[in-house]
Image (cartoon, coloured by chain):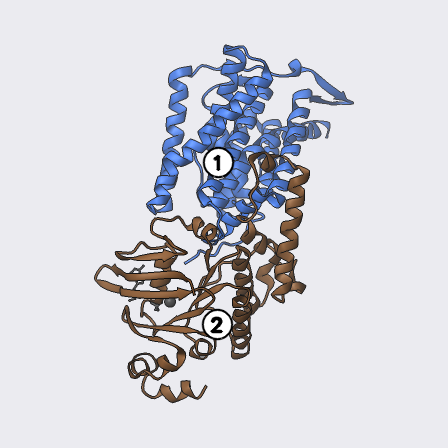
């Protein structure tokens, strides 16, 4: 399997705090990989480093064979990496369809002439864009909401829409920051199925998550962080039975609860 | 009553000019949450540019328009790239940007002052004072032109923002610039586009305004700035429809003040409205209470 994302010796400090310290990660094409760890472990910081939001003090991030350093945020979508946000960042006063169309904006490129004039070719391209966006929405089970303003949707659907919008950018790697936060167990289960269906479209997924049951269910490979460092890595069987992990992340009493899930 | 209606007709023409300017304020605010104090200077610069090419150089009107639009478009683009973008890149507080727009405004005004002086010039116009007489009312051809042109532009602009790919990108950036960037939208290009459109509209309204009043001097920028700003705040800043509504209300107030009280007081009306809005409805007529993002 091809390595889609490779991270070597990644470090980042804020003032005196070493938020991320010498982290290495690998994400292979077609996998669902998770980063877990208690609050303050440095997960979001890793995410922000991967997505170019912060620049690393040390280390290397290689995505799809190319280093990520110095890339502008809008380039990530062109290169096939997209992320969602822990707090929703939808275009609130736009419809579901419009949100998804914005995800497709960089896929369809107009010439300067087409930007100014409504040529027949442009109209066909627009038509195709709309059809493709609507189809994606339908495939993801949100067909009924196509023209609903997205701030009127229930929270769970808004989270889902953020995923659909991210998919519209046609990513190779989809990065999810705490996708289960704020979802009830039923919605969390739906989310797991949803993530599988995304993976089945051939998209690689990197998840940061708190919700252990979700991680257990979906992950091919898990990295556990604590205090900015990598504590342990492996498949869920390996990680969930690791003494250090049980102690640091779940606490001694919690081990049974997780394995009982 | 006839007099009142005549004043209203004048106000509609005036309001069209204010609306064209106010929309530029509102667009920039929508995208950057920044009040662009240099907008009035761009309005003035546009009028001067037209004057220079049409009168001093002697080019035909359509070429003068074209060159002015291109020049002012470049000015709008360069203004953002050279002064505001570096502040955004280094995450300076919004307030710094505000001061920066004031600075640009002063620089532009004084540049025009140095090269063109402060005297009032006669501005060329179309239709040389001809007007349409409808019973007791007189509507000048230039007023008709201004209103028609403004309506056409407003309709085109709202269609653009609603439908066109770039227009949708503009709305997306206004709503959430970080998410837009992550969707692959080059936010700085969208900001540039906004400045170009806003500046060209300001230049157009500068020219139309001078054609209607038939005179030009370097103070027209600060006068329009107050009025367009009042219109924008009155309508709800960041809201294009609101800006247009506000523009017409400000123009009506001004026209009636001039007609019924004293024409010396006409500019005062905008200040009074601005104060009342800020006191009683700071989010404007169509604006929603803004929850500050944390
Ligand atoms: N922008 C920042 N400035 C200063 N400290 C930060 C910043 N971002 C994160 N940190 C610190 O880095 C550590 C890791 O935080 P974070 O990556 O958010 O953890 P997690 O997402 O795993 O809960 C914390 O101690 C946090 O206070
Ligand atoms: Mg976090």
Residue A260 at x, y = what percent? 44, 88
Residue A44 rendering spot, x and y as whole percentages: 36, 64
Lateral position of residue A203 relative to residue B143, left or right = left
Q: Quadrant of residue A100?
A: bottom right
Residue A209 horizontal side relative to residue B53, left or right: left
Quadrant containing the C terminus of chain B in the rendered view: bottom left
Q: Position of residue A130 (x, y in %)?
A: 64, 52
Decide: is A170 above or below B3.
below
Q: What residue is at 41 percent from the left and 70 percent from the top?
A: A34
> Percent x, y for residue A242?
32, 82
| The residue carrying mark 1 has its beta carbon less than 8 Å from ligand 1 | no
Q: Residues within 10 Å of mark 1 (few under 14, many from 20)?
A: many
Letter of the chain that mark 2 sits on in the rendering:
A
Residue corresponding to mark 1: B195
Q: CA distance from mark 2 to mark 1?
A: 39 Å
Which residue, given by chain and number where applicable, does mark 2 sit on?
A182
For the residues bearing labels 2 and 1, Cβ distance under 8 angstroms: no
Residue B130 sits in quarter: top right
As rendered, which of B280 and B121 lies closer to the eye?
B121
**Chain letter for mark 1:** B
Give the blue chain's letter: B
Q: Which mark is residue B175?
A: none
Question: Can see residue A185?
Answer: yes
Q: For ligand 2, tell me if the residue under mark 2 lies within 8 Å.
A: no
Q: Secondary structure at mark 2?
A: loop
Q: Colour of chain A?
A: brown
In the displayed orientation, state which residue is furthest to the left: A16
């Amino acid at each position: 399997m091809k390595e889609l994302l490779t991270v070597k010796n990644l470090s980042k400090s804020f003032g005196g705090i070493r938020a991320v310290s010498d982290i290495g990660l690998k994400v292979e094409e077609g996998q669902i990989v998770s980063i877990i760890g208690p609050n303050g472990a440095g997960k979001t910081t890793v995410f922000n480093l991967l997505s170019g939001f912060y620049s690393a003090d040390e280390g290397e991030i290689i995505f799809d064979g190319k280093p990520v350093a110095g890339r502008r945020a809008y380039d990530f979508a062109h290169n096939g990496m997209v992320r969602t946000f822990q707090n929703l960042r939808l275009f609130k006063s736009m419809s579901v369809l419009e949100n998804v169309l914005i995800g497709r904006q960089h896929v369809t490129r107009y010439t300067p002439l087409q930007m100014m004039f409504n040529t027949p070719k442009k109209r066909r391209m627009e038509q195709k864009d709309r059809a493709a966006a609507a189809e994606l929405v339908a495939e993801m089970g949100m067909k009924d909401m196509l023209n609903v303003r997205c701030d009127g949707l229930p929270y769970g659907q808004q989270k889902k829409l953020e995923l659909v919008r991210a998919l519209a950018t046609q990513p190779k790697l989809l990065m999810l920051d705490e996708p289960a936060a704020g979802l009830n167990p039923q919605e969390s289960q739906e989310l797991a199925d949803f993530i599988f269906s995304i993976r089945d479209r051939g998209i690689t997924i990197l998840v940061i998550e708190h919700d252990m049951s979700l991680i257990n269910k979906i992950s091919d490979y898990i990295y556990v962080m604590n205090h900015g460092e990598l504590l342990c890595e492996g498949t869920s069987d390996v990680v969930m039975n690791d003494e250090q992990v049980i102690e640091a992340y779940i606490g001694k009493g919690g081990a049974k609860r997780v394995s009982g899930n | 009553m006839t007099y009142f209606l005549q004043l209203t007709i004048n106000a509609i023409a005036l309001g069209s000019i204010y609306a064209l300017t106010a929309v530029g304020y509102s667009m920039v605010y929508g995208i950057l949450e920044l009040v662009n104090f240099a907008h009035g200077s761009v309005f003035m610069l546009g009028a001067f540019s037209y004057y220079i090419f049409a009168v001093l150089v002697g080019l035909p009107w359509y070429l003068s328009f074209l060159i002015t639009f291109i020049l002012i478009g470049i000015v709008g683009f360069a203004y953002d790239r050279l002064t505001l973008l570096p502040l955004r890149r280094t995450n300076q507080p919004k307030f710094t940007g505000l001061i920066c727009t004031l600075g640009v405004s002063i620089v532009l005004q004084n540049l025009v002052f140095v090269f063109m002086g402060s005297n009032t010039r006669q501005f060329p116009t179309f239709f040389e004072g001809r007007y349409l007489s409808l019973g007791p009312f007189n509507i000048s051809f230039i007023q008709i032109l201004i209103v028609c042109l403004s309506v056409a532009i407003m309709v085109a602009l709202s269609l653009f923002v609603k439908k066109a790919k770039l227009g949708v990108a503009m709305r997306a950036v206004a709503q959430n610039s970080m998410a837009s960037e992550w969707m692959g939208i080059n936010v700085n290009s969208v900001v540039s586009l906004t400045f170009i459109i806003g500046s060209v509209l300001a230049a157009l309204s500068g020219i139309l305004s001078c054609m209607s009043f038939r005179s030009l001097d370097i103070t027209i920028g600060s006068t329009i700035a107050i009025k367009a700003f009042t219109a924008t705040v009155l309508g709800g800043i960041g809201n294009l429809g609101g800006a247009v509504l506000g523009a017409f209300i400000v123009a009506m107030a001004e026209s009636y003040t001039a007609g019924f009280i004293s024409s010396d007081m006409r500019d005062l009306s905008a200040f009074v409205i601005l104060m009342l809005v800020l006191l009683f409805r700071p989010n404007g007529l169509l604006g929603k209470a803004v929850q500050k993002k944390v």
